[in-house]
Image (tube, coloured by chain):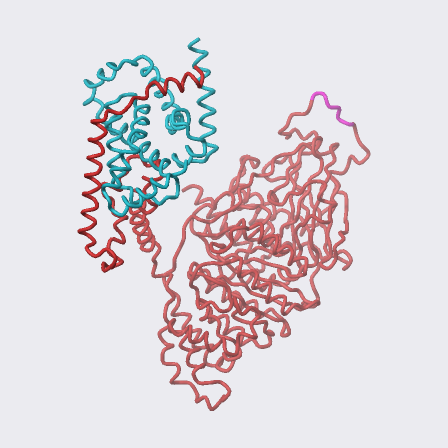
Amino acid sequence: MKDSPQDRALIEAAQAGDSKAFETLLQLHYDRLYRFACKWCGNPNDAQDITQQACIKLARSLGQYRFESSFTTWLYRVVVTTAIDWYRSEERHVHDDTEQLPEASTHPSEDSSVYLQQILKKLESWGEGFKSTLLLVFAEGLSHAEAAQVLDVKESTISWRIHQIRKKLSLLNKEAG
Amino acid sequence: MNENELKKLLDNSEQSPNPQAKQEAIRTAVNAFEAMHAQQKIAEPIDDKKTEKKSQGLFSWLRLTSSSNKMNRRTPMNKPRFPQQRWFLGGVATASLAFFGLMLATYHPAFKTPTPMDMDTYELNLPEPAKKPSLPEREIQTEFDSAAAPPAESAMLDALSKDKRGQLPDAELMSTPGLARAKITTEKRAQQTGFMAERKLMADDAYTHPSFQAEGKDRFENFETNPIKLTSEEPVSTFSIDVDTASYSFVRRQLKQGVLPQKDAVRLEEMVNYFDYHYPLPDARNEPFSRNITVIDAPWNDKKKLIHIGIKGYELKEQPKSNLVFLLDVSGSMASPDKLPLVKQSMNLLLSKLRPDDTVAIAVYAGAAGTVLEPTPVSDKQKIISAINALQPGGGTAGAQGIKLAYQLAETSFKKDAVNRIILATDGDFNVGISNTEELKGFIERKREKGIYLSVLGFGSGNYHDKLMQDLAQNGNGVAAYIDTLSEAQKVLVNEATSNLFPIAKDVKIQVEFNPASVSEYRLLGYETRTLKREDFNNDAVDAGEIGAGHTVTAIYEITPKGSGAELVDGSRYTKTEAGSEKGDEYAFLKIRYKLPKENKSKLLSSPISKHTKADATALREANFATAVAGFAQLLKDAKYTGEWTYQDAIALAQEHKGNDEYGYRTELVQLIRMASIAQEM
């Protein structure tokens, strides 16, 4: 993933304090963040929240971006972190939100979404990092190396996780069949 | 489900963002962005000129603020830095407190080196340097000051290093200030020895201060009493002789304090060999020792018999030359009156036994090792005595380093025709510097092959590391003696000086083969820590014990004659007992292997032990006394084979056979048995 020169100019301007440049950056990349968040939580309301959080986080931490990795990688890292944090705080307040839960099921593609979320839940139970690995590699189409950069682990770890996911999913399949 | 299905699911769950929400999110973020930059602008009004202090906010990253409380710590961006880890600051604080507590707990006034009071005024009494113009005045002064005032030590070291270091065998080892006090080189000292020796002796009295007494940390090797063996199953018994006496002295010390000794401290053979037995001297020099075999009834079971094997080395007509290096532990733990002061007295005693052309050197170790006296002929006795008397305790214990230094000294004054020996005096604690005793033992072993032997004198109790002392002495072809009183020092270093210093045979091994036709069971009394494998007897590479000039060594076997009815093990129903072999009147066959001190090939002596051994009255008396000691040792350690026999019986047996008892050692044994019986009742 190479940053476009346009991105680079915008980032440098935003780091210097240009709020217009920052806004443009967000306009360009919001959709990508939102889509990822959507897949993460399977719920547009939560996804909006997560994306907003991620945007605010970007505003605060853009100055720390050092062009060492590509900007997209860095964005993914921010949104993954935000999503994990958001879920944790959500778990803590889960009783507050119980009445809001049915809202999610009003969506048309409800069934598949619920099914996906079940799979993702399962993935989470295997351990840290499986869910984000799956989303980054399968849904976002990142290479193992790029996913490794986002999650700050070794590339071999990502490959191993993907291998595990494939193996276990086929097992799930057999059980279901 | 396969991957494709999953990907499809993922794609399906994708939804285009709500533009309203998008704009709202972006607006919020931009607001946050602007707010942050506005703040930065206020904080840095002149951006390009960094006027703020560099140190400002230097430690803000250490503060545990809300921003440092990252919820997702696994993500590297959020990882707290090392000193921000929750345990770090608390850990540092706890460690400081623990260290302070430790300092408080270990501080003890007795560890402090006392300042002799009568030393300060010395330089006034000094003769003018004109008397000896080559010696600068400053040196004399610092030298005396150094004995009194620690701050002057480094000054003295400076003075020393100018002209003296080159002469010392190991300049590096010498440079430790902690030892500077003891390092007054003898050349200069000799000029003042006349009055110095006197003053130092007086000062010594002032050093005797309330002592530090460690309790209950004496370490002994654990061992089991030799079991009864069946002659038919294991007819051969092999062991190495043991001339050490440390166990008896240690047991005596414990008993005199009114407590029974630890069982592992009781080594029967060392208690038996503590006493000198009147065995006849060997006739010829080609056989360095006489063998004396006596068979008596066992006092604790009249159906059993005791076979005494007594060995006596020949006496030297002329004392050989010796090159001794004393290695003294002067660590803080040696301060109590029964340690370093006793060491000094013991050394003075030993000096009286040496020939004028013998050499003596003294190395000390505490926090570090150093030379106090370079090899000096005994004819210069005054110099040696004053060096001994100048010793003071203080510091930790770096035994291994000290041993290396002592060997260096012994090598510099090595004499081919003399006995080269290091005498290590310690309270047994090598608590600094040495982590690997195996390595140390290997080192001593290699030096032994070069002809330098090592003996160990143990002092004090409470922290006595018996096992290590035994190991060192065994590997160094020396004796391990335990010195608890001045009379014990007299015994070990004066009366038995020749036997303890001058070996006449080394690697002495005993092998006894019992005759299954006449002996059904046997048991070796003691020597548990010295047993050898049967095949080691003929293997000259296997190390064993030494015999010194005039030494006596006694080994006792308890046997059950065939058909006596006292067998503890039932006979086998199926094994045929061979009927009446032709050597039916022999109990056993004794074989002894030894090497002469300078040789590496062993010689063999052998003789049968007959049922009808005749013994004269003296031999019987000696055997009975040895039996009393052995019985006493068994009562102390493990009375499972002595039946109804009591301390009172031991007293009676010892009293009856103590002979003329020139030095009173045997009478002392009787007293000790009484003390043991009292301690037992309590």
Rendered view: B200 above or below B453? below
Please state the extent of the stretch shown in magenta in the rendering.
Answer: B573-578
Nearest the eye: B527 or B624: B527
Residue at the front extreme of this rendering: A6
Quarter of the image with the C terminus of chain B is top left
Nearest the eye: B439 or A43: A43
Chain the render paints red: B
Q: Position of residue A83 (x, y in %)?
A: 29, 30
Looking at the image, residue A125 sits to the left or right of residue B439; the answer is left
Q: Judge whether residue B24 is colored magenta.
A: no
Is the magenta region chiefly helix, strand or loop? loop
Quarter of the image with the N terminus of chain B is top left
Rendered view: B569 above or below B656? above
Looking at the image, residue A5 sits to the left or right of residue A93; the answer is right
Nearest the eye: B538 or B337: B538
Looking at the image, residue B51 sits to the left or right of residue B305; the answer is left
Residue beneath the point at 61% across and 42% down: B525
Q: Position of residue B256 (x, y in %)?
A: 45, 52
Rendered view: B601 above or below A93? below
Q: Position of residue B98 (x, y in %)?
A: 32, 50
Q: Colour of chain A?
A: cyan
Query: Residue B233, located in which quarter of the rendered image?
Result: top right
Query: Residue B237, located in which quarter of the rendered image?
Result: top right
